């Protein structure tokens, strides 16, 4: 049910505060419609006993919409206006500096409000505001989760949840810390992120499911301002849809300028979509369009490929990570497509740890035979060697390309077994032509991959580097997750394309390198 008095009380408190930045400094904090709705719903919706119904509010919105001011207003209300004796309100973020942004806004708001200024004692050395009438406080916390157990939380302001490196601090601050309070509030505010295995994306998905009616949680209040996956990011109407403060806190001309820059420089596109339109994107430098990749999903009967000519790419991991071996079957006529068949390995003892650490379902993939495990806690190259020989016995593997940097004894052993091993450089010169070729084939739907989930995850992780001549290469350095399967696919495709034209020269020579 809704308590109008509680709603109006919270809004009146925040409206009495003043803005703190730029031309807005000193201007009364009149809540914009979207802010008014959030405060009204969160503080006005109550249970039959009169206490707040919502103990978690998730607000996802683009940058420069007034998140920090709203969060600071909520923090001060929880500290000073919520009627809780000895309230403990904490500001959290990925690091103390980020958490201090909202705190600094709150300090300035107090400084501009005589009524609060005479009742609040700032202790700047520990970034704490003490509200003397109820012995309550608002304090910034560092990010070390192990120091936070035992807190008696009334409120938590979690700023930029997408930047959390793991879920430890979130779990410590939100799981059981407010059990001794009658109406604790966890106020989560963030822009969209890039890591779809993060705690923020987990909460984001919960919010999406609740908004869509797929889940019900009466204690969780979701708000997401952003454009959908299939929305036109160049349409200004969608900019207003994603930015409820556009025209108030941000001038439309600044968004237009940012859009023009992103349009001219593809490397900025994802940043624009993430920060300005609140879209969850994979990398800051976009490469593979995953909707185009998904469109190449066709069923592959591996048994029908027995005895077919193919080319391999082998990306050997370090001892602790993923190893990928990919076969590419070239088309035999104009009606056929390139076929990609991947294989993956990971140390068995390392698998559970990786699941917990990275929030990637290696265990599910193993059960469903999408990934193989090797005994022990490091990669067993002998097992991989045995498996490759067994795989190669089913097909006519003409060549296997491998990263010469990671060459090990396994390469020599496979050569001794009669397999042709081709060293493959990872620089722009070697990687650019087949990388662009693969991208072109995906756009043309000239590739079939059977939607292998591990391979899809690898391609979704890819970040590319570009040199001055517009050559590109897949970059493990700037990609946030594993891309081994994508690298192996590029190497295998290179050998398949080159050998398809071996009688008349490379296809790269005959029609040139594709430039995007």
Image (cartoon, grey):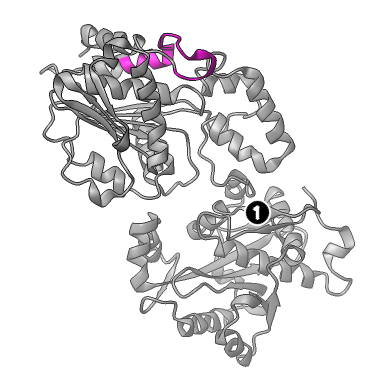
Q: Residue at x 54, y 80 (%)?
A: 388
Residue 123 in sight from this viewpoint: yes
> Relative to the observer, which residue lies in front, 23 or 372?
23
Residue 204 in sight from this viewpoint: no
Was residue 504 drawn as part of the magenta stretch in this picture?
A: no
> Relative to the observer, which residue lies in front, 285 or 84?
84
**Where is 56 relative to 39, above or below?**
below
- Residue 157 on image: x %, y %: 32, 31
Q: Residue at x 33, y 46 (%)?
A: 143
Q: Which residue is mark 1?
A: 464
Task: Please give the range of residues in magenta.
Answer: 20-39
- Residue 349 on image: x %, y %: 33, 72
Q: Is residue 17 left or right of residue 225?
A: left
> Relative to the observer, which residue lies in front, 172 or 391?
172
**Where is 8 relative to 63, above or below?**
above
Q: Is residue 314 left or right of residue 350?
A: right
**Where is 414 relative to 492, above or below?**
below
Which quadrant does the N terminus fall into?
top left
């Amino acid at each position: 049910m809704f308590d109008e008095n509680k709603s109006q009380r919270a809004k009146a408190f925040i409206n009495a505060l003043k803005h703190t930045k730029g031309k807005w400094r000193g201007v009364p904090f009149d809540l914009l419609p979207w802010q008014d709705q959030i405060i009204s719903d969160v503080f006005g919706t109550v249970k039959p006993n009169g206490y707040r119904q919502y103990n978690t509010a998730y607000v996802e919105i683009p940058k420069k919409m007034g998140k920090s001011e709203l969060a600071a207003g909520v923090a001060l209300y929880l500290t000073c206006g919520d009627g809780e004796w000895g309230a403990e309100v904490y500001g959290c973020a990925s690091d103390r500096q980020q958490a201090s942004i909202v705190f600094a806004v709150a300090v300035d708001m107090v400084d501009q409000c005589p009524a609060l200024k005479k009742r609040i004692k700032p202790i700047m050395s520990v970034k704490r505001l003490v509200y003397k009438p109820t012995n309550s406080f608002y304090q910034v916390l560092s990010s070390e989760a192990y120091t936070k157990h035992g807190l008696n939380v009334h409120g938590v302001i979690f700023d930029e949840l997408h930047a959390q490196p793991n879920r430890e601090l979130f779990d410590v601050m939100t799981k059981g810390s407010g059990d001794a309070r009658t109406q604790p509030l966890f106020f989560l505010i963030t822009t969209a992120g890039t890591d779809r295995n993060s705690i923020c994306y987990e909460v984001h998905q919960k919010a999406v499911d609740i908004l869509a009616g797929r889940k019900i949680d009466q204690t969780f209040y979701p708000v997401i301002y952003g454009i959908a996956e299939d929305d036109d990011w160049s349409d200004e109407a969608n900019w207003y849809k994603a930015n409820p403060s556009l025209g108030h806190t941000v001038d439309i001309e600044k968004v237009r300028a940012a859009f023009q820059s992103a349009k001219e420089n593809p490397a900025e596109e994802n940043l624009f979509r993430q920060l300005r339109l609140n879209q969850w994107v994979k990398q800051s430098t976009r490469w593979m369009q995953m909707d185009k990749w998904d469109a190449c999903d066709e069923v592959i009967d591996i048994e029908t490929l027995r005895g077919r000519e193919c080319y391999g790419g082998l990306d050997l991991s370090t001892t602790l990570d993923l190893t990928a071996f990919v076969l590419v079957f070239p088309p035999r006529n104009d009606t056929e497509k390139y076929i990609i068949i991947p294989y993956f390995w990971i140390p068995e003892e390392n698998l559970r740890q990786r699941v917990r650490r990275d929030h990637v379902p290696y265990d599910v993939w193993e059960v469903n035979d999408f990934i193989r495990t090797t005994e022990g806690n490091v990669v067993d190259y002998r097992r991989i060697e045995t498996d490759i020989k067994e795989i190669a016995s089913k097909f006519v593997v003409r060549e296997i390309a491998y990263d010469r940097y990671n060459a090990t004894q396994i390469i020599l052993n496979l050569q001794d077994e009669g397999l042709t091993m081709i060293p493959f450089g990872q620089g722009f010169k070697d990687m650019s032509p087949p990388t662009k070729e693969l991208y072109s084939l995906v756009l043309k739907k000239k590739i079939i991959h059977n939607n292998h989930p591990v391979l899809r995850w690898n391609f979704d992780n890819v970040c590319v580097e570009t040199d001055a001549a517009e050559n590109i290469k897949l970059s493990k350095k700037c990609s946030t997750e594993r891309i081994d399967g994508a690298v192996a696919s590029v190497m295998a495709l290179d050998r398949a394309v080159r050998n398809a034209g071996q009688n008349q020269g490379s296809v790269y020579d005959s029609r040139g390198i594709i430039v995007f």
